[in-house]
Image (cartoon, grey):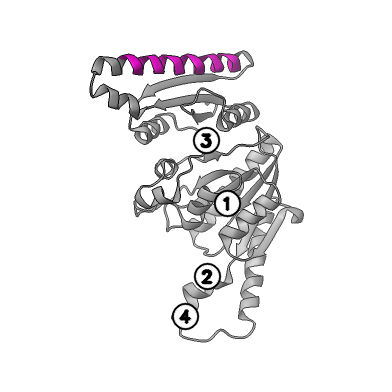
Amino acid sequence: MDDPAQLLLIASSRMQRTPAFERAVSLAEACQCGLRILAVDYIRVLEVLGLFNQEVLVTLRDSYLQTHRRWLQSEAAYERKRGLDCSVHVMWSDQVVDEIRNCLASMQPAMLIKDIHRESVLKRVFSTPLDWHLLQGCQCPAQLVTPSPHALPRKILAAVNLYRADDADLRLNDAVLLEATELGRQTGACVHVLYVYDWSSIYAAGMPRLGMPVESGFEEALSDAHEEEFARLCQSHGIDDRHRHFMTGTPISTINGFARQNEFDLLVVGTLPRHNLTRIMGNTAEVLLGHAPCSVLIVKARNGGDDV
């Protein structure tokens, strides 16, 4: 008999039940999964103190780890009493991303869950934020959680991309909808699907190279073709007409505005593997991660392809 699926929660260094903590516990219960909690602690101030007195560093570090481990173990024990398979691992390391990746490789969880890590615009110019580094090596779905009044998502918005139609893109759309609909089934959340048709980008990417003017009615015909393909995609995943949203505009602002206006609490987007290490996710997913009005679930295609 196969072992039950596991969820991996990356615990905050703060000793409190953060939004990601509550989301992970609730998802594990709803999906009947085990929950593994990993805390990778590193406080730079203590390391600075250690330059002057190594013994003080060891004492302070061990004291902090013991306190954090004791608090997490207490919370895990509480959840085990409620019937949840829950365990804790705490370590000290300044290589946070590497430690999490090692855990992902050995554990192969069904989903990674953590609180979203926001960075200032200025800092992004000089370094890639923690979440983007982490997602580069994470093959399982990764849910980055923002504060919410609900432990479980109630309204899920899956954003698909029909701009290109090669095999990798089609697999990615299917992966996004499979993840969204399965999560909706397990949690009882209502699932909506959105495609933003961006004629200006399509024209800018292809038409000038053709060296010919756009025929009258071509834009309308192309829009109709995209809408028909969107309908087929939704139908294949059992999304009814009321929950399909075909819109025209700029993808990032339209997706954000639609999610905010309609009070979605989870946005599901896809990204293909990036071969250029200076860019980790596709443009749309990358910007949404930094500015989305709700939690974001990043789904990767299982096979390689171009950037999203």
For the residues marked 1 and 2, what is the alpha-carbon distance in whole angstroms?
23 Å
Q: Mark 1 points at which residue?
A: 174
Instruction: Kindly identify the amino acid type of the residue bearing the numbered disc 2.
Output: Ser
Please give the range of residues in magenta: 59-80
- Per the image, label 1 sits on a secondary structure element best described as helix
The mark found on residue 115 in the picture is: 3
Q: Point out residue 288 in the picture as x, y percentages from the top left corner.
A: 53, 51
Q: Name the residue under label 2.
A: 201
Crowdedness near tag 3: few (<14), some (14–19) or many (≥20) residues, C-alpha within 10 Å? many
For the residues marked 2 and 4, what is the alpha-carbon distance in whole angstroms?
11 Å
How many marks the image carries: the answer is: 4
Q: Magenta stretch containing residue 64, yes or no?
A: yes
In the rendered view, would you say 109 is above or below 237? Answer: above
Q: Give whichever of discs 1 and 4 has the lower sequence position.
A: 1
Between label 1 and label 2, give the one nearer the viewer: 2
Give the quarter of the image for residue 235. Answer: bottom right
Q: Is the magenta stretch mostly helix, strand or loop?
A: helix
Between label 2 and label 3, give the one nearer the viewer: 3
For the residues marked 1 and 3, what is the alpha-carbon distance in whole angstroms?
26 Å
The mark found on residue 208 in the picture is: 4
* Relative depth, front residue between 139 and 298: 298
